[in-house]
Amino acid sequence: MGAMKATPLLTGLTWLLLCQSAGEALTRLVHLGLPGPVLGMLLLVVLLRWKAVREPVGAAADALLAHLSLLFVPVGVGVMTHMALLSQYGVRLLVALVLSTWIGLIVTALVLRAALPRTSAPKA
């Protein structure tokens, strides 16, 4: 029997899992205050410069995005399971959600404004 060739999807998923595992390992070894998956994502961003990594990860991303709606099933089950808590704290949760979203948008806009170079106003 000849050696089987890995599909781009499996290769891409392997890269994703390896980057996440490497991020977790580095975070635990060095005791960083950064979550392992975030460090793994930063590692993946560096690795995406190479076509041998970029193409399979792209295939895996396309497959995962095609089934993205399945990731909402656990959230829906959690909401149904904790309906009593939602009825008790729902208004507070909604206020916290709206405020945190607005604060995040404002901070992002301020950081973007500070990071972009200043341009002069167009001449009329």
Image (cartoon, rainbow, N blue to C red):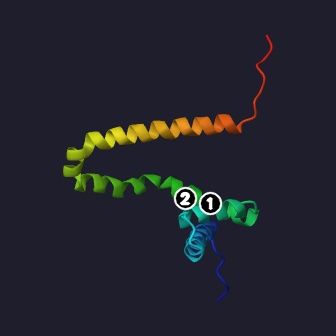
Residue 16, percent from left and from top: 59, 67
Give whichever of 65, 121 is nearer the camera: 121
Residue 9, percent from left and from top: 60, 66
Question: Which label is found at residue 63?
Answer: 2
Q: Is residue 19 above or below residue 119?
A: below
Number of residue marks: 2
Picture quarter with the N terminus: bottom right
* Gap between marks 1 and 2 measured at Cα: 6 Å
Mark 1 residue element: helix
Question: Which label is found at residue 59?
Answer: 1
Give whichever of 12, 90 is nearer the camera: 90
Q: Which amino acid type is marked by label 2? A: Ala
- Residue at position x 56%, y 63% in the image: 34
Q: Is residue 25 above or below residue 79?
A: below
Residue closest to the far right: 123
Residue closest to the far bottom: 1
- Residue at position x 52%, y 54% in the image: 65
Q: Is residue 52 left or right of residue 90?
A: right
Give whichever of 11, 35 is nearer the camera: 35
Question: Which label is found at residue 12?
Answer: none
Q: Is residue 83 above or below residue 33?
A: above
- Residue at position x 79%, y 10% in the image: 124
Mark 2 residue element: helix
Callout 1–callout 2 Cβ contact below 8 Å? yes
Q: Which amino acid type is marked by label 1? A: Ala
Q: Is residue 96 left or right of residue 41?
A: left
